[in-house]
Amino acid sequence: MPPAGAQPRKPNAPSAANKEANEYIPSFISKKPFYIGDDDDQNDYLEHQRLQKAQSDQSKWYDRGKKLGPAATKFRKGACENCGAMTHKTKECLSRPRAKGAKWTGRDIQADEVVQDVSLGWDAKRDRWNGYDPKEYKAVIDEYTELEELKKKAVTTKEDEEDEGEDGAKYAEESDMGRQQSTATRQLRIREDTAKYLLNLDLDSAKYDPKTRSMVDSGATADTAAALVAEEGFMRASGDAAEFEKAQKYAWESQEKAGNTKLHLQANPTSGEYYRKKEKEEAEAKRQAHKKMLLEKYGGEGNQDAAKLRDAAIIESEKYIEYDESGAIKGAPKRVAKSKYPENVLINNHTSVWGSWWANFKWGYGCCHSTIKNSFCTGEEGKRAFEEADRLRTGGVLGEGEPVKEIEWPSKETVEKASEDISKTLMAKKRTMEEMKGGVSEEDMDAWKKQRVGLHDPMVKFLGKDELLE
């Protein structure tokens, strides 16, 4: 029994592992799949049907850019030579490459990064949004918010301008002094004009159509009224109507270009007429100045070149002229073409120009046959010297001596006799097998030496002869 005044203690709820098997649950629900295991004693027999607990490591990700602590003050052995961190090598360093790394300077050594071993599940490895920071999307939201505000401001400004434009158009229509007119009032006639249907009251003439505000069959009759009506866009050009149209157009263009509202044909006609005449005078002055400049540059009536061009102009004439195939006049003397270079200039006592003679693929002077341009003329002596040099160069001297002897070819008998002698000599040189086995005798050695001397001695022809040379 619990003590007096104490709350009764509730019994512990039975755990899932201690629950008894319910015989009414079908076997296809209570039976575990083959890939779960058979730990019936320790786990709940229906654990595979329970709501599984979410794994805490499933959404775990790397802490990007996290450092372990304060950076080292001196370079450590085995650290990155570029930034000085111990957690990566020089090839894996993501810092900007320095001209002289931390290994040599010992300055600006970076702290070590946090190297994490994150074990991800099957779904976490394939989750494309795993590790995404939602705070990064705030920059995109701020950008779109700013764009929306700018659009709202632009729309508000445009509405204000449209309101102002509508007010100005209404005022122009009411005063009947502006260029802007609504569609409803654009086709109306001027009040001072006579209505078209009152020009001719004859029933047989052109008829007036009130819907289109035009005369029907206006050209069918030849009366004056039908001719005056014409079509809708009829322009009156009699009297000062043309000047009035020009003044009205000038006032409108001035308002559109410069925004000057003071120039108004109806409100201020004197000012509009004054400025229109002033602009017309300035344009005329510019035109006269341009014309004067052209006359000074190219000449006017007193220009001789212009007079020559006028005289050379093609005019009709009864004079008969016949032309040849090249376009020149037949019978006219041929004109020698002139060159911009000096011609027929004789230098260094030459009587002919350079290039008047050609020999051996070289240009020269025809007076002395010299191929050197700046040489002095030698006249006929130079020609003879050139001919002599050319004769020596081509071998012409050899042909002037004794006549060339004809070659005496040996007869057939002499050739056969020589071939027999050669064959005998070769056979005499060859030794038999017995002689080769027995060796070389002294007589053979002496004969070979004599024969050797005979081949190489230039005086071998005179050996054994007592004849004297002439």
Image (cartoon, grey):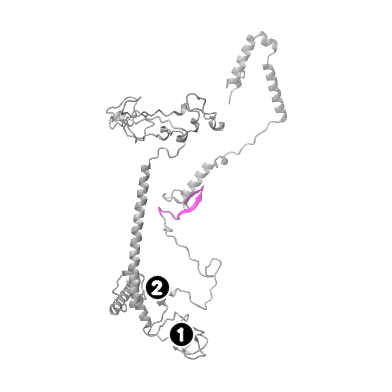
Count of numbered circles on the image: 2
- In the displayed structure, does residue 47 sit left or right of residue 407? left
> From the viewer's perspective, is residue 406 above or below residue 152?
above
Q: Tell me the mark number nearer the camera, choosing from 2 and 1.
A: 1
Q: Residue at x 34, y 55 (%)?
A: 149
Residue 289, label in figure? none
Q: Residues within 10 Å of mark 1 (few under 14, many from 20)?
A: some
Confirm whether the magenta stretch covers residue 353.
Answer: yes
Q: Which residue is mark 1?
A: 229
Relative to the observer, which residue lies in front, 61 or 204?
61
Q: Which residues are magenta?
A: 347-364
The residue tagged with tag 2: helix, strand or loop? helix
User: Residue 43 versus residue 172: which sits nearer the camera?
Assistant: 43
For the point 55% across and 68% down, the residue is: 324
Q: Is residue 296 visible?
A: no
x and y, in percent, of residue 453 in the image: 59, 17
Residue furthest out toward the top: 438
Give how far across and how far down residue 191 sits, in percent: 38, 83
| Residue type highlighted by circle 2 | Ala
Q: Residue sitting at 36 percent across and 42 percent down? A: 135
Count residues near mark 2 (Cα–Cα under 10 Å), then give few for <14, some for 14-19, many for 20+: some
Q: Would residue 19 be counted in the magenta stretch?
A: no
As displayed, is residue 381 above or below residue 168?
Answer: above
* Image quarter hosting the N terminus: top left
- 329 lies left or right of 454: left
Q: Disc 1 marks which amino acid?
A: Val
First in sequence, mark 2 or 1: give its number.
1
Q: For residue 303, which quarter of the picture?
A: bottom left
Question: Which of the numbered marks, if any, corresponds to residue 306?
Answer: 2
Along the line of sight, which residue is nearer the eye, 280 or 318? Answer: 280
Residue drawn at point x = 55 percent, y = 72 percent: 322
Quadrant containing the C terminus in the rendered view: top right
